[in-house]
Amino acid sequence: MNTRGARAAAGLIHGYTATGVVLALLMVHLSYEGDVRAVLWLFLAAMVVDGTDGFLARHFKVKTVMPGFDGALLDNIVDFITYAFAPMVLLWANGYLPSGALGGVCAAVPVLASCYQFCRSDAKTEDHFFLGFPSYWNIVAFYAVVLGFGPTTTAVVLGVFAVLVFVPVKYLYPSRTVTLFRLNMTLSALWLAAYAVITAQLFDPNPFLVAASFVYPAYYTAVSLWLTVSSRTPAAVSEPAAG
């Protein structure tokens, strides 16, 4: 690819990443409109963008082609508002958190914890893991909606995961962790498919599918804990092929 074409491709990829802020704007608007199902669909769209833009960026060597633009910073901005901020708006605006000021506090705690998570220099380790709970608040919100959590239950769950942000467990980075890479990506894709079906079935999803959807989070947690305590170092000597 010539230089002009390479820069155009890099710009398009950055633009693709930036579509996440538009999705986030719609998430917030529709949360206050009470359209919970639409917001969950937007969560899915944001996860697909987040799960694919990195592959594209590495394949087209975006960092080399456009060194003056910080794609990693853009990615963090988009991830913060789609994975942390918007999910708290959804929960708070639709009665999944306590009423009044207490609900605001419950929504603020995960957002503040995510501020720390996204600003720490070692949040993404050199061997391609997340250190501490990686602010998957969109997934927490998804299950709060699907399982019909009451305000107290949701508040407790948010508090537990907010604490886990500060616990130095190395969590899988599905698209980059080399250990069990193909299995990680396969299970991630299957979980996203289950997410889509469950969202389409709201608010009466198939209970067996909902139960089955927990297989991947359980696997993700178990493997992350195993790799954290394992005596061997799961460092990547080479990165998985993009695409």
Image (cartoon, helix red, strand yellow):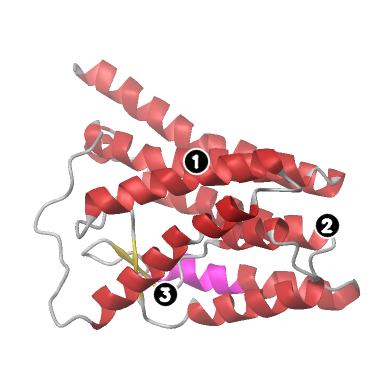
Q: In which quarter of the image is the N terminus?
A: top left
Rendered image: mark on residue 132: 3
Residue 66, visible in the rendered structure: yes
Extreme residue in the left direction: 237
Q: Report the magenta residues as a range.
A: 112-121
Is there a contact, CB below 8 Å, between mark 1 and mark 3?
no
Rendered image: mark on residue 94: 2
- Which amino acid type is marked by label 3? Gly
- In this rendering, position of residue 81 left or right of residue 239: right
Residue 25, visible in the rendered structure: no
Q: Is mark 2 on a helix, strand or loop?
A: loop
Q: What element carries label 1?
A: helix
- Which amino acid type is marked by label 2? Asn
The earlier-in-sequence mark between 3 and 2 is 2
Picture coordinates of residue 176, whole percent (x, y): 27, 53
- The mark closer to the camera, 1 or 3, is 1
Picture coordinates of residue 59, whole percent (x, y): 23, 34
Real-space Cα distance between discs 2 and 1? 25 Å
Q: In this view, does 146 lie above or below 226?
A: above
Q: Residue at x 63, y 36 (%)?
A: 22
Picture coordinates of residue 234, whole percent (x, y): 17, 68
Rendered image: mark on residue 193: 1
